[in-house]
Amino acid sequence: RTYYTNAAPIISNDGQALGRVAVLHDITHYKEVDELKSTFVSTVSHDLRSPLTFMRGYATMLPMVGEMNDTQRQYADKILSGIDQMAQLVDDLLDLGRIEAGVELTYNKIDIAPLLSDIAQEYWQHTHLNGIKLQVDVPADLPPIYGDQALIRQAITNYIGNGIKYAPNSGQMMLRAEKLNGEVIISVKDNGPGIPQEVQMRLFEKFFRAQQRGTEKIKGSGLGLAIVKSIAEKHGGRVWCQSEPGKGSTFYFSVPIANKQ
């Protein structure tokens, strides 16, 4: 069975620690439902790909049929935008299903410093155009990790993309890696508006999107952070966020250090 555990210290009136109390919630049923949902979503996602390809093809051909007025062009653009959003959702769902199933994953030793440098160069123009200066901070003696490099790259770029989306024109974004207690911890820090504590607990849930002032029109599938969580867990790591409203946010994920053998 599967249990969700909460633990808290018991403190006496004079401040002495008397022990701890733990509460276990049986969530087996919810896990089973979640697995069924994942299977259903994966199947539907595969079935949606072909119709979306046809829809996009025909939508791009609309201007070829004849001259369109401004209103017609606007409608055609909205159709294409909607198709692109749906296609991105399908891709994210398929990525998530592949990661959770462990399909086509290749594990090797990965040097983090050159990977982060490569990602920073790749995203330089994108961040610059959005008013963000992306910086990298990696110690010279950082040990390698063991993992699927494509997935590690995807986790990092999902964090960066999330920062660009929700914290544009925020000045500096820091991409950092450090060694701590047998893990390499990779983080992305932005100077955006920050995230309330009650929202942080749900950020990595599938399809969850925080509804804050100024973010209502931001498009997304609500799967980017859930994908990072799945990637971290496939590598024996974890994810978390530290943030305060008005003080920016830092998103972390950890991966165990590679064995020396």
Image (cartoon, rainbow, N blue to C red):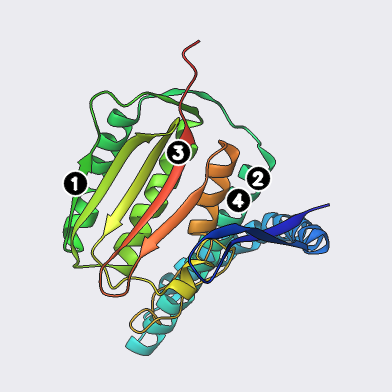
**Quadrant housing residue 189:** bottom left
Q: Earlier in the sequence, mark 4 or mark 3?
A: 4
Secondary structure beneath dot 4 equals helix
Of circles 4 and 1, the one toward us is 1
Q: Which residue is mark 1?
A: 135
Numbered mark located on residue 196 in the image: none
Tell me which amino acid carries mark 1: Gln
Query: Relative to residue 45, is residue 222 drawn left or right?
Result: left
Q: Is residue 101 above or below residue 86?
A: above
Using the numbered discs, state the Cα–Cα distance from disc 3 to disc 1 in whole angstroms.
18 Å
Q: Which residue is mark 3?
A: 152
Q: Which residue is mark 4?
A: 96
Mark 3 burial class by Cα count in 10 Å: few <14, some 14-19, many 20+: many
Numbered mark located on residue 100 in the image: 2
Mark 1 burial class by Cα count in 10 Å: few <14, some 14-19, many 20+: some
Q: Residue at x 41, y 85 (%)?
A: 72
**Quadrant housing residue 28:** bottom right
